[in-house]
Amino acid sequence: MDDVRRQTGGRGRRRPRQSDIARVAGVSQTTVSLVLRGTDVGMSLARETRQRVLDAAERLGYVPDPVATRLASAGNAMLGLYTFSATFPTDVAHSYYPILVGVEEEAAAQGQDLILFTGSSRTGAGAGDPASVRRVRAADGCLFFGRHVPEEPVRRLLEDGFPLVYIGRRNEPGIPYVGADYVSASADVLARLAAAGHENIRYLREEDEAPSSGDREEGVLRGARASGAGTAGLVVRTDGTDLDALLAAWLAEGVTAVVVEQTDTGAALAGLGAAIERAGLSCPRDLSLAVLGAPVGARGRAPGGGAVFSGFDVPMREMGRAAVRLLLQLIEGADGIETRRLLPCEPVGGGTVAAPRRG
Amino acid sequence: MDDVRRQTGGRGRRRPRQSDIARVAGVSQTTVSLVLRGTDVGMSLARETRQRVLDAAERLGYVPDPVATRLASAGNAMLGLYTFSATFPTDVAHSYYPILVGVEEEAAAQGQDLILFTGSSRTGAGAGDPASVRRVRAADGCLFFGRHVPEEPVRRLLEDGFPLVYIGRRNEPGIPYVGADYVSASADVLARLAAAGHENIRYLREEDEAPSSGDREEGVLRGARASGAGTAGLVVRTDGTDLDALLAAWLAEGVTAVVVEQTDTGAALAGLGAAIERAGLSCPRDLSLAVLGAPVGARGRAPGGGAVFSGFDVPMREMGRAAVRLLLQLIEGADGIETRRLLPCEPVGGGTVAAPRRG
DNA sequence: CTGAAAGCGCTTACAG
DNA sequence: CTGAAAGCGCTTACAG
């Protein structure tokens, strides 16, 4: 009785399995498996045998047990997704959502299910704690994702040969990733500003250190040098508050264009936008404004205008898709593939950059 | 070689299993299983033996294989989430997101991981195809979610005693669900309109049939009757297009308030809002407007105003949380619990309803 | 206190 | 053309 319970989930008849079909059709269980899976050998069986198996399966209402199928074949067909913040942030303006969309799309296309590791283990430890990270081994491989990452447990996985891919560039050597080419895209924004005639530019970035922020700054500096604009005083850090005085000073100094990074918090852009509105200014009339990295399809609206921000888009959705593909290649043991990939960012002309007002 | 491939994911060491731990710790695989699962007998082993097993497991980075665990007839602390549309819709205004947030929050709080079943199988069949639905058995239980649902495969799961919970009310008898009490909430909106003095009201709903739409209509009719407003001509269906003429006719007929349902497409509300704006009208000055069911925290802005819509909020996040809790109760085999639950919707005063202009 | 064995329902060489 | 057997990585009586 207890055994019946176990097998039926507590009620109903036991589900038919291949051996039941075999008995009814008078063949071996192997043959049933071969026929039902439609393998080459299964197809080459006597027509009459095949039909007997098919009929019996139909009559018994057979459906394969996916759990047994997965156990018997290679892999679980499950990819992990581990995020160091909540996977589904509460704030509406979270920037990670498009990545999840891409990951799910590609996983579906590849016949893979997704295990969302919630980060907090049964023990109640928080995200990033080693025991929590370790659980990702339940999947065939895992995607990691978040600006900051607990290095130790992940390094351990890597050493053990567990297939994993970061979404976002990483400095740690040997870690496979799919990131965005912020350096080139940021340099390009500076080049476009220079081409529009801007010579006095400021770059506003957040305090937070992360590879993506470092890359943007590097690109800004590179672009400034290339256009001969110079880099002294170019980079300014902010936590997003009290930008009014800073903005006023810039204008007094003859600054004609400001570049700002967009992160998951959006603090710098939000702060600057608010300051511009409070000052009664409008972009690009009074000041040109370029934004480094809004997610594709989620572009913000510029202060006082309603125009799309000039700058570039981060191909988040494509990053998610590409990360899934790379992870599958690693799981399959592909050789000689590039495990560290940067995707190009799409330039956005937008409406917040114009030629500087000649004073 | 090919075999090593399969097991190692292409590089490094293969995933450690219980027999590996057994070898290292010098005990049987059975003992490993007993210790790791923390069973009574496992706990009663020699302290030193236990420790050897635990140490070896830690050292090897062991994590149980969820598929094998499930096949051997045990739980794997994973809950499924199956959606019949894409889990992560592309359009920004998707209304399901808060549910996912709730599901993830509660799953994390309960120490459960989440498997996102991607719906489309390797065969390229679409969501809702039977083979795809069947895969949910890999989890201990599964949440289902979407306006329309393929009944057959789900009924099958139910018959087999597989624990499942719908998010959203279902008509099919026997299906456990956590839904929103649209009937009461909608009736309440009508009562509030009547209390504000409205006697000539229209209800605009979409063509699409779904339990949630049916419930809203039922509530509207009930509310109208209760307030003595009458129900003749009250309900009007739309696909969201060409509402200008309809709106004009209503005004000519002396309609002072319009109620509209909000669905995942948002077609009716969007169409009506556009028509109101084109007509140069403003709510609630020229017309009172109530919306049945915006998700909490994602309230739209009313046309021409900027005010929050009057109506009620759907507690999507709480629905997600409650569904997880119910599913866990079913998995644990709790007896005598209510398996069909409706959560109350929060009334929203909003700014789009006022007393009718006396013409 | 610990282990050998059977079993979950499949797939996949391997034999004949 | 078909079948006996081993194996996927676990759990769970059952023995000792």
Image (spheres, coloured by chain):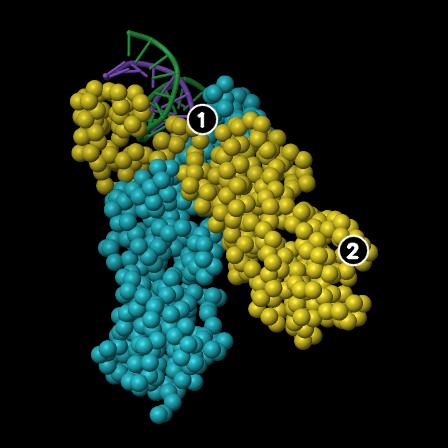
Chain colours: A yellow, B cyan, C green, D purple
Where does the image place residue A267, in percent across and percent down from the top left? 65, 61
Res B25 → quadrant: top right
Residue B184 visible in rendering: no
Q: Which residue is mark 1?
A: B30
Q: Nearer the viewer, residue A149 or B69?
A: A149
Residue that appears at 34% across and 87% down: B197
Three-letter amino acid code at disc 1? Answer: Thr
Seen in the image, is B324 located left or right of residue A98? left
Q: Which chain is indicated by disc 2?
A: A
Co-location on one chain, circles 2 and 1: no
Seen in the image, is A189 located left or right of residue B4? right
User: Residue B283, relative to residue B69: is it above or below?
Assistant: below
Q: Does dot 1 land on a helix, a strand or a loop?
A: helix
Where does the image place residue A257, in percent across and percent down from the top left? 72, 63
Seen in the image, is A155 located left or right of residue A323? right
Res A202 → quadrant: bottom right
Where does the image place residue B348, in percent across and percent down from the top left? 43, 74
Q: Which residue is mark 2?
A: A229
Residue that appears at 62% across and 69% down: A303
Seen in the image, is A60 located left or right of residue C14? left
User: Residue B219, relative to residue B74: is it above or below?
Assistant: below
Res B57 → quadrant: top right
